[in-house]
Image (cartoon, rainbow, N blue to C red):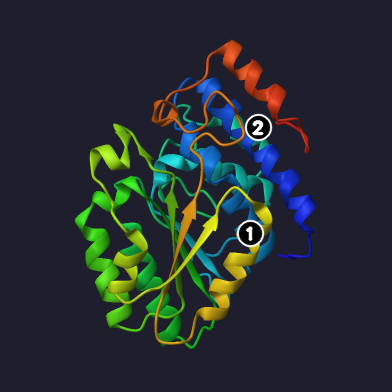
């Protein structure tokens, strides 16, 4: 897939993706808008600028960069980005969380949706899968990168830290792990539920190279992701602490865990769409 789009172009795409997110969640009155909105810039940067990938989907992904979504509840942003980058028809977004839809609340492989390589949503598993894929690429002489996204509340899962020990120990240096560091999880702030302390010091002590970025500044996201790619191949994996605002782009949703898994009503949808002007064509919602 060509990655020649300008930063301004992908900023516009990110606005449309946010628009898709609130429309999808509103239509079925179910889903997770908060983290999806916060991660829109990151996913758009990956799929429209940073990664080498092919929307003519092949599960092996030989010669391509791979992305794994560990915090699968933010499926609205993942589905929107996959559709907008050509993996399946944008019109299918209207089926989100509907009976017999391929776009269920958490992505699954048995639905046969192009772009989805693992079932995710059981938190804590994504890094382990990404490590396996990254090691397979090294064994196969494939020099492309593997990206994985987790939430910060997800770091409460012990499997995360087992994987975080393994990757540096085995010199899995084609792996880029990004943490959506928004400080919120379903029951409240991460500081209240399970304080993370000095997270950068923790991942560095485990043997990772660490970067930080503002995940809602597209210029900085693209620059940091490219820098992370340049740091690979040096015997250590890379971890990016991505500071985002939950609900970013919709003023009444921003910064609150209350929008982790709540759908907007009709009036709230209208307010959100006033702030997210269409930059691409909206998909139609069936009546």
Q: 26 or 93: nearer the eye?
A: 26
- Is residue 150 visible to the viewer in this orientation of the structure? yes
- 9 relative to 201 in the view: left or right: right
| Quadrant of the rendered image containing residue 194 | top left
Q: Quadrant of the C terminus?
A: top right
The residue labelled by disc 1 is: 220
Category of crowding for the residue at label 1, using alpha-carbon neighbours closer than 10 angstroms: few (below 14), some (14–19), many (at least 20): some
- Residue 117, percent across and down? 45, 58
The circle drawn on residue 19 is 2
Rendering quarter of residue 166: bottom left
Give 21 or 197, whichever is nearer the viewer: 197
Q: Is residue 56 shown to the viewer in this render?
A: no
When asked about the image quadrant of residue 57, the answer is bottom right
Marks 1/2: CA–CA distance: 22 Å
Task: Determine the secondary structure under disc 2.
Answer: helix
- Residue 282, relative to residue 265: is it above or below? below
Label 1: state its secondary structure: helix
Q: Residue at x 24, y 50 (%)?
A: 156
From the viewer's perspective, tell me whether residue 64 is left or right of residue 85. Answer: left
- Which is in the foreground here, disc 1 or disc 2? 1
Please tell me which of labels 1 and 2 falls first in the chain.
2
Q: Give the percent coordinates (x, y) of residue 207.
A: 32, 77
Residue 85 horizontal/vertical position (percent) = 67, 52
């Amino acid at each position: 897939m060509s990655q020649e789009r300008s930063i301004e172009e992908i900023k516009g795409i990110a606005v449309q993706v946010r628009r898709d997110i609130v429309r999808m969640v509103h239509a079925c009155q179910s889903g997770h808008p908060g983290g999806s909105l916060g991660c829109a810039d990151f996913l758009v940067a990956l799929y429209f600028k940073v990664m080498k990938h092919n929307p003519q989907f092949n599960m092996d992904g030989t010669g391509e960069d791979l992305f794994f979504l560990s915090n699968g509840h933010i499926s609205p942003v993942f589905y929107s980005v996959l559709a907008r980058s050509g993996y399946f028809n944008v019109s299918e977004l209207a089926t989100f969380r509907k009976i017999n839809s391929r776009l269920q609340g958490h992505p699954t492989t048995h639905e046969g949706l192009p772009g989805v390589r693992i079932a995710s949503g059981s938190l804590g598993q994504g890094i382990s899968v990404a490590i396996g894929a990254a090691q397979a690429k090294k064994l196969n002489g494939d020099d492309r990168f593997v990206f994985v996204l987790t939430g910060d509340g997800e770091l409460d899962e012990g499997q995360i830290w087992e994987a975080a020990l393994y990757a540096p120990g085995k010199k899995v240096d084609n792996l880029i792990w990004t943490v959506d560091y928004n400080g919120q999880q379903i029951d409240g702030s991460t500081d209240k539920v399970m304080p993370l302390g000095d997270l950068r010091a923790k991942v560095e002590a485990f043997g990772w190279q660490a970067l930080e970025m503002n995940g809602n500044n597209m210029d900085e996201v693209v620059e940091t992701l490219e820098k992370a790619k340049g740091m690979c191949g040096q015997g250590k994996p890379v971890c990016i602490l991505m500071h985002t605002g939950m609900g970013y782009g919709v003023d009444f949703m921003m910064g609150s865990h209350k929008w982790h898994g709540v759908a907007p009503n009709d009036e709230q949808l209208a307010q959100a769409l006033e702030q997210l002007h269409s930059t691409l064509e909206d998909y139609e919602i069936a009546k």
